[in-house]
Image (cartoon, grey):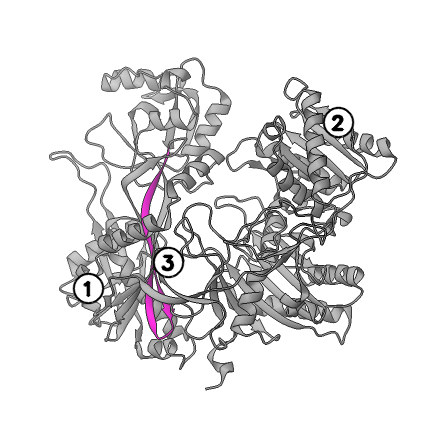
């Protein structure tokens, strides 16, 4: 069979051989026996349309009522939406069954207020799946056909069916309230597990990992409200419940399901639509043609005097007003909105686990899932191993990193993925002649002498590190952090320019806090209005300036001014050095879930020298949640022109690292984007055809590695920086590999997955793996190897920065901010900045 027919992407060359061979455990469990029967696939339509959790109850009830009769006692599995898979054929091609869901328990002798819900379930045979084709695919004898995809989906649904019936399930994960931890603001984190059936070389595996997600705290609605509003006690709200409190609370509570406590016979759920603008004591409505208020009504009807009549009521339907104190929040409701900074920090604290702990948790997950005792797996004839797979890995050698020849250690090989700047000078130091300082605060916050002392220390460190700073006394300006930031920055810019009669190159901004609003506005003004690089520093670091901190700031300033920090000698990167070559990094960043106004942002960076140390950037806004980059052609033209102006020649080779693509989008992105790159080249010159390699970079996956021997891990118990895996758990025949290029600081390191979709540069496994790993030593912001190839990392920074470039944002509070931002409100970055690394 020709390679062309097996995959539209790239077939894997021979696996790599470079580096030191080791064995590692990976969090995959082998399916030791695939179902040895044909699987029957049925389409199912449940009307009326309800969420998966209700669909599953309907399905369960259907099995009770019709299982023995109409479904011939088979034990089918269901995905909660549209698909049923059965180990036995049903005795019909198509059938509609009527299901009446019994209403939630109602106390004896009480007439339920609502009639039970009736559903129609239409089941229609879709296909019969023979797993022979899947076996052929796993053994590289057949392409990934629709039949194979359906077979993998069937296995996925089979392993997920039972947990989804028992636990709160989200996508491929399920969660339990056991051992949940409270987060700030009435939210709690639930622990759970992720599982996914993955094809690999000659076998199917189950990828099993720990997972965590946020849920609303269940129980008293009042207690939840107090936490959302960050008060200590409900009595704190007696003193006044402001409009701002009300709108914050309404935003948080809208859509939540509650039950009421004042009537034992009512067991139905209510959904919060909004809050009343008035407290319960003055929320009035008409009852039997007389006007009454909620508090009085409750006293007259239920003999219940409200304890908190100053709180608003929740509105759950037309003229249904419920005082908050009679409402309880149902358990198991996910918090979908974006977490705020404090919640995110708490979440990271709870979920960050060292490798050994994570591995043990995964083993616990295996016990909870108990595949062996799972009657559905048994019925389908499927068996799963009880130990993690062991795979061959290699630790690639680190490259020699070069700094300025005058450094005491100009060339050295880093150990354990980290080094420092002691006795080193940057490869090319920039000159800083015209600059200014803005302190956002008063002299009481940071006295002038402190500000001057910090600037002195910063200058000394920058000069020691190889920069040239002729102007040792830049003007210092104090500005109100809550005032007009744009005016303050324009003033500072004018003063800096007047001081030395030349265009300012940099503004150093000293910030009073880590809040987003001020930082966002500074970057909007500097990047899109004034067009000058800014370096923000925290006021807390300036009072007692530390050498190490100043050195880190210096690394960022140097590249923002066009300098180069470090490089690899040309003989180590022949792919870059032998012929003019450009590296591209691209990313698309999407708005957070539930955000209906903001667009997606596409970014592209391109290397601008033979050392791949300097990059230029370009960015576009595009329709929200579109995966492919709409104007990639225009962006590539822009960066190829800049490359030509910088280097005097056209690149003959292109290596394109693309972040932000999920597996399902590979084909679409490849077809659209390689064509755009090609078209961009012919736009510049009809005969210009550089060779292109297109690699997708993924960090959002659940593969984790654990050293099998203590002495083969780093001091945190992670695999060593440079660990590469291209056998055992990778695609059956396409060119992909996992590379853990960094030394983790906390928790379990996440390797990056690289998948080659197109390759005209004829990379071998070793050449692409080693080249990518070497590049990970050239991230300009720190003296460590990073987890992501720098081109992709920089693209990510450019896209994140562009979020701040909208005039329509109000970054008022740390929640997903208020926004009038649509595509029209984003301002372009000034052209001069795009050529330097302003996004650092």
* Number of other residues with Cα within 10 Å of mark 1, as a class: few under 14, some 14 to 19, many 20 or more: some
Label 1 element class: loop
Q: Are marks 3 and 1 in contact (CB under 8 Å)?
A: no
Residue identified by numbered label 1: 75
> 572 above or below 747?
below
* Number of other residues with Cα within 10 Å of mark 2, as a class: few under 14, some 14 to 19, many 20 or more: many
| In front of the other: 831 or 417 | 417
Name the N-terminal-most of marks 1 and 2. Answer: 1
Q: Are marks 3 and 2 in contact (CB under 8 Å)?
A: no
Residue 203 on the magenta span: yes
> 310 above or below 254?
above
Q: Residue furthest right?
A: 501
| In front of the other: 238 or 236 | 236
Residue identified by numbered label 2: 476
Q: Is residue 217 left or right of residue 557?
A: left
Q: CA distance from mark 3 to mark 2?
A: 52 Å
The residue at the point 33 percent across, 21 percent down is 287
Label 3 element class: strand
């Amino acid at each position: 069979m020709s390679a062309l027919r097996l995959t539209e992407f790239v077939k894997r060359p021979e696996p790599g051989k470079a580096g030191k061979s080791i064995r590692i455990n990976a969090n995959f469990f082998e399916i030791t026996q695939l179902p040895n029967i044909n699987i029957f696939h049925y389409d199912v339509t449940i009307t009326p349309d309800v969420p998966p959790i209700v669909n599953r109850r309907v399905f369960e009830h259907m099995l009770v009522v019709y299982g023995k009769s109409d479904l011939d006692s088979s034990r089918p599995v269901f995905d909660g939406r549209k698909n049923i898979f059965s180990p036995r054929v049903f005795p019909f091609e198509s059938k509609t069954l009527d299901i009446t869901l019994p209403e939630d328990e109602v106390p004896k002798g009480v007439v339920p207020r609502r009639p039970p819900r009736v559903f129609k379930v239409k089941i229609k045979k879709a296909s019969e799946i023979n797993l022979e084709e899947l076996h052929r695919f796993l053994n590289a004898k057949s392409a990934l056909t629709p039949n194979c995809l359906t077979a993998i989906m069937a296995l996925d649904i089979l392993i997920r069916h039972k947990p989804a019936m028992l636990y709160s399930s989200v996508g491929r994960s399920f969660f339990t309230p056991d051992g949940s931890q409270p987060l700030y603001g009435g939210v709690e984190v639930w622990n759970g597990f992720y599982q996914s059936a993955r094809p690999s070389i000659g076998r199917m595996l189950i990828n099993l990992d720990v997972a965590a997600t946020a849920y609303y705290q269940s129980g008293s609605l009042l207690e939840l409200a107090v936490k959302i509003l960050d008060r200590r006690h409900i009595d704190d709200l007696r003193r006044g419940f402001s409009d701002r409190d009300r709108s914050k609370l309404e935003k948080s509570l809208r859509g939540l399901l509650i039950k009421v406590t004042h009537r034992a016979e009512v067991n139905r759920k209510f959904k919060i639509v909004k809050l009343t603008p008035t407290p319960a004591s003055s929320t009035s409505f008409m009852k039997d043609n007389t006007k009454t208020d909620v508090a009085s009504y409750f006293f007259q009807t239920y003999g219940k005097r409200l304890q908190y009549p100053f709180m608003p009521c929740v509105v759950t339907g037309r003229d249904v007003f419920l005082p908050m104190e009679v409402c309880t929040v149902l358990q198991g409701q996910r918090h979908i909105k974006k977490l705020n900074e404090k919640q995110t920090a708490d979440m990271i604290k709870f979920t960050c686990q060292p490798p050994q702990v994570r591995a043990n948790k995964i083993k616990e997950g295996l016990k909870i899932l108990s595949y062996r005792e799972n009657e559905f797996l048994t019925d389908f004839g499927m068996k799963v191993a009880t130990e993690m797979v062991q795979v061959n890995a290699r630790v690639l050698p680190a490259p020699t990193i070069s700094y300025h020849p005058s450094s005491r250690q100009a060339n050295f090989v880093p150990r354990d993925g980290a080094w420092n700047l002691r006795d080193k000078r940057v490869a090319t130091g920039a000159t800083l002649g015209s600059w200014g300082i803005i302190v956002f605060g008063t002299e009481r916050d940071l006295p002038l002498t402190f500000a001057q002392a910090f600037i002195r220390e910063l200058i000394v460190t920058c000069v020691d590190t190889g920069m040239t700073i002729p102007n040792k006394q830049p003007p210092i300006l104090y500005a109100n952090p809550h005032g007009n930031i744009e005016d303050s920055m324009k003033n500072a810019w004018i003063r800096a320019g007047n001081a030395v009669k030349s265009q300012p190159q940099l503004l150093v901004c000293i910030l009073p806090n880590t809040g987003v609003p001020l930082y966002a506005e500074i970057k909007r003004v500097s990047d899109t209005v004034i067009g000058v690089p800014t370096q923000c520093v925290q006021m807390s670091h300036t009072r007692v300036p530390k050498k190490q901190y100043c050195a880190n700031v210096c690394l960022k300033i140097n590249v923002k001014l066009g300098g180069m920090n470090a490089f690899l000698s040309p003989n180590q990167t022949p792919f870059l050095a032998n012929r003019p070559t450009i590296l591209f990094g691209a990313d698309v960043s999407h708005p957070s879930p539930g955000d209906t106004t903001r667009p997606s942002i596409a970014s592209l960076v391109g290397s601008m020298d033979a050392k791949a140390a300097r990059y230029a950037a370009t960015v576009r806004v595009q329709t929200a949640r579109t995966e492919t980059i709409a104007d990639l052609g225009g962006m590539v033209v822009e960066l190829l022109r800049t490359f030509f102006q910088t280097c005097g020649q056209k690149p003959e080779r292109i290596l394109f690292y693309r972040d932000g693509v999920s597996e399902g989008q590979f084909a679409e992105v490849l077809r659209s984007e390689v064509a755009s790159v090609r078209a961009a080249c012919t736009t510049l010159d009809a005969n210009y055809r550089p060779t292109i390699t297109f690699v997708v970079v993924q960090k959002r996956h659940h593969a984790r590695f654990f050293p099998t021997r203590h002495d083969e891990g780093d001091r945190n118990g992670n695999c060593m920086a440079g660990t590469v895996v291209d056998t055992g758990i990778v695609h059956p025949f396409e060119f992909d590999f996992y590379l853990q290029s960094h030394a983790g600081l906390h928790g379990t390191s996440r390797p990056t997955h690289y998948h080659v979709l197109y390759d005209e540069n004829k990379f071998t496994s070793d050449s692409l793996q080693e080249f990518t790993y070497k590049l990970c030593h050239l991230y300009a912001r720190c003296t460590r190897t990073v987890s992501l190839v720098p081109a992709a990392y920089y693209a990510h920074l450019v896209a994140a920065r562009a979020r701040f470039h909208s005039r329509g944002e109000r970054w008022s509070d740390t929640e997903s901010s208020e926004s009038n931002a649509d595509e029209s409100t984003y301002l372009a970055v000034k052209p001069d900045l795009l050529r330097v690394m302003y996004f650092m």
